[in-house]
Structures are given as C-alpha cells and as structure tokens.
Amino acid sequence: MKKILIATALAGAIVGSFASVSFAAPLPAMIDSHAPANIITVDHRCGPFHHYVRGFRARDGRVIPGHCVRDHR
C-alpha cells in the first residue's frame, strides 16, 4: 500500500511539473506602412537609396567621420 501511495505521488508530481510548461505563440510580423513594399529599411540613419559608412582614417592620417553615401544604382 505504501509503495502505491509513493508511486502515485511521484507520478502526480511529474505530470504536474510538465503540465505547467507552455510555449508562447510567435508574434506576427509587423509591416511598416510608411515604406513601399519593394524597399526594405535596413538603417534609419540614412534616407532611401543611401547607406551608412563608418568613420575611418584616410591615407594621410585624417579622421573621416561616419556619413551617408548614395547607393550605386
């Protein structure tokens, strides 16, 4: 009788621990209504048809800060 009681309690604990685990549903994709369908916004620092170039040092040692440049299209 004691073995049945311990086995039932153990089975109840196992089932109870797995019953509380649930997985959240993924969120739906948000579509930006301001951008046209064929343009994907990658970076918000530059406008359309431009991309951001990080700062760098020129050959003569000058520091060129980061800036936006036009795409080659």
Image (cartoon, rainbow, N blue to C red):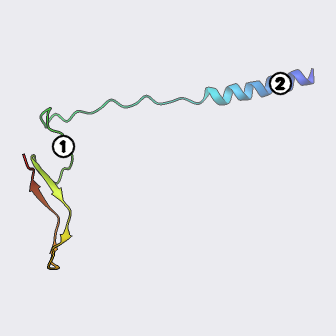
Mark 1 lies on a secondary structure that is loop
Residue ID at (15%, 75%): 59
Residue ID at (17%, 79%): 61
Q: Which of marks 2 and 1 is in front?
A: 1
**49 to 22, vertically: above or below:** below
Three-letter amino acid code at the position of disc 2 = Ala
Cα–Cα gap, marks 2 and 1: 59 Å
Residue sitting nearer the eye, 34 or 68: 68
Residue ID at (8%, 49%): 72
**Outermost residue toward the right?**
1
Quarter assignment of residue 4: top right
Residue sitting nearer the eye, 61 or 51: 61
Say the numbered circle drawn on residue 22.
none
| Quadrant containing the N terminus in the rendered view | top right
Residue sitting nearer the eye, 65 or 16: 65
Is 20 displayed left or right of 44 in the figure?
right
Quarter assignment of residue 14: top right
**72 to 13, vertically: above or below:** below
Quarter assignment of residue 22: top right
Is 3 displayed left or right of 28 in the figure?
right
**Outermost residue toward the bottom?**
61
Say the numbered circle drawn on residue 41.
1
Residue 21: percent from the left, percent from the top?
A: 58, 30
Neighbour class for label 1 at 10 Å: few (<14), some, many (≥20)?
few
Say which residue label 2 marks.
7
Three-letter amino acid code at the position of disc 1 = Thr
Mark 2 lies on a secondary structure that is helix
